[in-house]
Image (cartoon, helix red, strand yellow):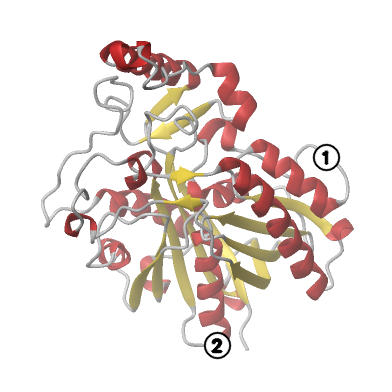
Amino acid sequence: MFRPAITGTGVFTPPNVITNAELVTAFNAYADRMNAENAPAIAAGEMEPMQHSSEEFIVKASGIENRYVMDKTGVLDPTVMHPLLRQRDDDEPGIMTEMAVDAAKKALAQAGKTAADVDAVICAASNLERAYPAVAIEIQQALGIKGFAFDMNVACSSATFGIQAAADMIRSGSIRSALVVNPEICSAHLEWRDRDCHFIFGDVATATLIERIEDAKGPHFEILSTRCATQFSNNIRNNNGFLRRSRPDGMQDRRDMQFMQNGRKVFKEVLPMVSQHIADHMAAEGVANTDLKRLWLHQANKTMNDFIGKKVLGREPEPGEQPNILQDYANTSSAGSIIAFSQNSDDLTEGDLGLICSFGAGYSVGSVIVRRHMS
């Protein structure tokens, strides 16, 4: 049985930032336009007028202040309200591949490794730009990696599920190392015209290099244990897919073809599920809450993270114990907990314990218990 370790991480951050102020201006202009176009129906009581959004509403609801996106022009155009991405030829690298390769190169550099040291690539993300060929295989080719690659989708939990898959393969001896990449273009499956969720998502890509611990060249995090769980729910759903054109109204501009959630039910059901999952995982591994030095959570909502952090630690988290990055990046789906880990782990010292956890649609939840080693 071989011991896996995280030896490097990388983050690709898109060049375009959208502030809450910009987002609110665009959304309110769209709302005014819709209300004007539907004025007779609104006056007759046949439909409700669209309400304005506000910066205060967004921060209070989520804790989000900014988000990075691959395109902001279309998102901020009240007549478009979605990203405008260039159509690429089939012989060009896909946009998700470009994002993932950038993050992967940073992870390899941090670990002091090259593509020749990698045996497998797992592209784990909440949405993939095509059905086949696998985006992971395109990433594998772009990096010049031998071995194999495959895609994985467990929504916002994809990163931790991918880490478990990679760690299990390393433990068994079938591979020595793997790259788990999480290219997320959440802006493309967000409904920017919906006041309840128009502020939630951002774009990013992360990469995590996992190797046999004896191959680590510098500071690293030994993966002590992983645990994943799923429980079916329709409360977070996206009905877009390859069967769309086979349905009578499938190609219409339907609301259910983008991200949808019942926020209240998600809060009520996911919070206890995740808190109990983490508690059970820690108990099974003999880890007390007083042993944890850091908790890197899925970056969906500040209130959710504060609740989970308090449940897991048994008290209010101290500054830095449960780092949040969503105020800058928004919800980046599977990548959020890895951004938090990448940006808030270098200060830990020999023997320190931490836990990475991501959760979301499915429902799904994955957790990874790690120990810091300086060499």
> Could you tell me residue 341's position as x and y percent?
62, 50
Q: Is residue 171 above or below residue 308?
A: below
Q: Which residue is mark 2?
A: 172
- Left/right placement of residue 60 relative to residue 114 reads right
Q: Quadrant of residue 277?
A: bottom right
Instruction: Check disc 2 and report its element: helix, strand or loop.
Output: helix
What residue is shown at x 75% (from left), y 44% (from top)? 307
Q: Quadrant of residue 26?
A: top left
Residue 200: image x %, image y %? 49, 35
Q: Which residue is mark 1?
A: 318
With respect to residue 312, does 42 lie above or below?
above
Say which of 229 and 215 sits in front. Answer: 229
Residue 124 in the image: state x and y as whole percent.
43, 62
Which quadrant of the figure contains the C terminus?
A: bottom right
Question: What separation in Å lies between label 2 and label 1 (alpha carbons)?
Answer: 38 Å
Relative to 200, say whether 1 is above or below: below
